[in-house]
């Protein structure tokens, strides 16, 4: 399960995107949220991992 792009951040001349996805813990079965700020082109690849 994954959430799509949440916010687009603009810093100087670079465009960055903050992505959040849910990851299920193999030990407890609980879901945790993993956040990352990256270039918009690499969001889909990151969500597929």
Image (cartoon, helix red, strand yellow):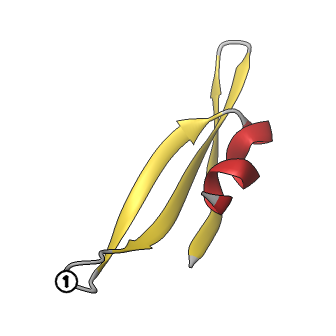
The residue located at (59%, 70%) in the rendering is: 3
- Residue 11 versus residue 38 in the image, above or below: above
**Residue sticking out furthest to the right:** 41
Residue 37 image position (x, y, % from top left): 53, 38
Q: Position of residue 6 (x, y in %)?
A: 60, 58
Q: Is any part of residue 6 visible from this angle? A: no
Query: Viewer-proximal residue, 48 or 21?
Result: 48
In the foreground, 4 or 28: 28
Q: Position of residue 43 (x, y in %)?
A: 70, 48
* Residue found farthest to the bottom: 29
Q: In the image, 36: left or right of 17? A: left
Q: Residues within 10 Å of mark 1 (few under 14, many from 20)?
A: few
Task: State the residue lying farthest toward the front.
Answer: 26
Q: Which residue is mark 1?
A: 28
Above or below: residue 36 compared with residue 39: below
Quarter holding the C terminus is bottom right
- Determine the secondary structure under disc 1: loop
Would you say residue 29 is visible in this rendering?
Answer: yes
Q: In the displayed image of the protein, which residue is found farthest to the top?
A: 12
- Please name the residue shown 80% across and 39% down the image: 41
Image quadrant where one finds the N terminus: bottom right
5 shown above or below 24: above
Number of disc labels: 1
Q: Quadrant of residue 23?
A: bottom left
Q: Who's the residue at 74% across and 54% down the image?
A: 44
* Place of residue 26 in the rendered image (x, y in percent of width and height, measured from the top left): 30, 77
């Amino acid at each position: 399960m994954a959430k799509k792009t949440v916010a687009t951040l603009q810093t100087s001349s670079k465009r960055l995107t903050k992505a959040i996805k849910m990851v299920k813990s193999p030990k407890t079965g609980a879901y945790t949220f993993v956040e990352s700020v990256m270039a918009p082109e690499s969001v889909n690849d990151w969500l597929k991992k």
